[in-house]
Amino acid sequence: MNALTQFAQEAVTSGDIIWAKSIGAGIALAAAAIGLAWVGASYMKALGRNPEAGKAAGQIIIIAAMIEVTALLTFLLAAFLITG
């Protein structure tokens, strides 16, 4: 993490702010993908232990949709920040 912080600081001080914004957007999108995978894996694990947990699929889909919306908003914000 120290190398990433140093790279971001050098990018900002050198005037190459596009790189810093791109790295930030990439980290945010990767975190959303990891979160979605974590929710899916946890649901499958719970479903394997207790087949009755299948009734909670609607709640899982809502949680996954919230993660996807967060990723979409991150992508749109990054697109506006990088181009602007």
Image (cartoon, rainbow, N blue to C red):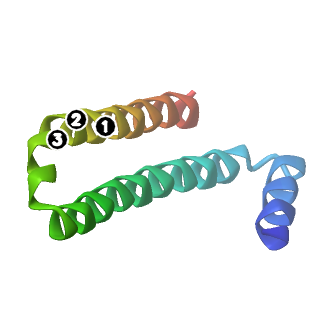
Relative to 77, is 18 above or below? below
Residue drawn at x 34%, y 54% as measured from the top left: 39
Q: CA distance from mark 2 to mark 1?
A: 6 Å
Residue with the mark numbered 1? 63
Give the amino acid at mark 2: Gln
Front label number (1 vs 3): 3
Which residue in the protein does label 2 denote?
Answer: 59
| Nearest the eye: 40 or 32 | 40
Q: Identify which residue is drawn at 38% across, 56% down.
A: 33
Drawn side of residue 78 relative to residue 59, left or right: right
Q: Estimate the x, y position of residue 15 in percent, counting from the top left.
A: 81, 46
Q: Are marks 3 and 2 in contact (CB under 8 Å)?
A: yes
Mark 1 residue type: Ile
As drawn, is 68 to the left or to the right of 84? left
Instruction: State the quadrant of the C terminus.
Output: top right
Tell me the tag on residue 56. Answer: 3
Tell me where residue 3 appears, x and y as whole percent.
81, 72
| Real-space CA distance between mark 3 and mark 2, rounded to the nearest whole angstrom | 5 Å
Q: Secondary structure at mark 3?
A: helix
Element type at marker 2? helix
Q: Are marks 2 and 1 in contact (CB under 8 Å)?
A: yes
Q: Check disc 3: other Cα within 10 Å, few if <14, some if 14-19, many if 20+.
A: few
Local SS, label 1: helix
Could you say where residue 49 lies in the image, as x and y percent from the top left? 21, 69
Quadrant where the N terminus sits is bottom right
Viewed as shown, does residue 5 lie left or right of 64? right
Position in image of residue 81 (x %, y %): 57, 31
Residue 11 location, quadrant:
bottom right
